[in-house]
Image: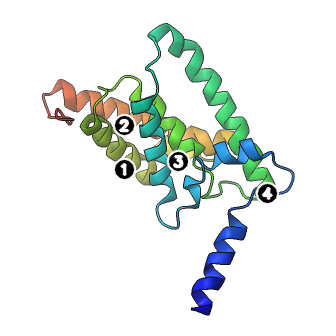
Amino acid sequence: MATALGDALRRRRASRCPPGLAFPIWLVATGALAGYCPVIPGTVGSLVGAAIALLAPRPSPAACLILVPVTLLLAVAVAGATAAALRASDPPVVVIDEAWAMWAASLTAPRRVGALATLGLLFRVFDIWKPFPVRAAERLPGGWGILCDDVAAAAFAGAAHHGLGARGVALGRAG
């Protein structure tokens, strides 16, 4: 009982906004606290991105030309500021990278739960496996290193998803 209470208190302290960081930045960086999930925080962050993709209005292709780079720059800044406040190069609680990459990859995928689940699985495979240049992108400084490996993994996942769909593989036709 005492151990469980101590663990709960440590998690609560750990989930507080770090000193010197604005609360909204911390909330965005952690995917509305999804990054504090005790297991698989990156996958939970990806689920946040998939939920945004399902629930938010899909932007037009012209709007994507502005929205994608602007939100990427904001995500880089948020991730970099949070990592600096936590004094870590890529803290596991920062899941804006997975959420942003999953959302961006979903912009060209069918808007169905099954298709997004397939895309999400492919994204996590490439994000964990880190084939070249995904691992190399991770070495960039600050928020760029946090985001760019996920951008590359999302690009691989999107290409694989479209390739499978073009070959007639069922990509979550139901849902």
Crowd tier of the residue under label 2, counting other residues whose Cα lies within 10 Å: few below 14, some 14–19, many 20 or above = many
Crowd tier of the residue under label 3, counting other residues whose Cα lies within 10 Å: few below 14, some 14–19, many 20 or above = some
| Residue placed under numbered mark 3 in the picture | 135
Who comes first in sequence, dot 3 or dot 4?
A: 4
Crowd tier of the residue under label 1, counting other residues whose Cα lies within 10 Å: few below 14, some 14–19, many 20 or above = some
Left or right, 136 with reference to 158: right
- Badge 1 marks a residue whose secondary structure is helix
Who comes first in sequence, dot 4 or dot 2?
A: 4
Q: As shown in the figure, which amino acid type bears the numbered disc 2?
A: Ala
Who comes first in sequence, dot 3 or dot 1?
A: 1
- Badge 2 marks a residue whose secondary structure is helix
| Residue placed under numbered mark 2 in the picture | 157
Query: CA–CA distance between discs 4 and 2?
Result: 33 Å
Left or right, 27 with reference to 100: right
Residue lying farthest to the right in this orientation: 20
Q: As shown in the figure, which amino acid type bears the numbered disc 3?
A: Arg
Query: CA–CA distance between discs 3 and 4?
Result: 28 Å
Q: As shown in the figure, which amino acid type bears the numbered disc 4?
A: Pro
- Residue 132's place in the image compared with 85, above or below, is above
Residues at marks 1 and 2 touching, judged by CB atoms closer than 8 Å: yes
The answer to which image quadrant residue 87 occupies is bottom right
- Which of label 4 and label 2 is nearer to you? 4
Who comes first in sequence, dot 1 or dot 4?
A: 4
- Residue 126's place in the image compared with 160, above or below, is below
| Residue placed under numbered mark 4 in the picture | 18
> Is 100 or 129 nearer to us in this picture?
100
The N terminus, quarter of image: bottom right
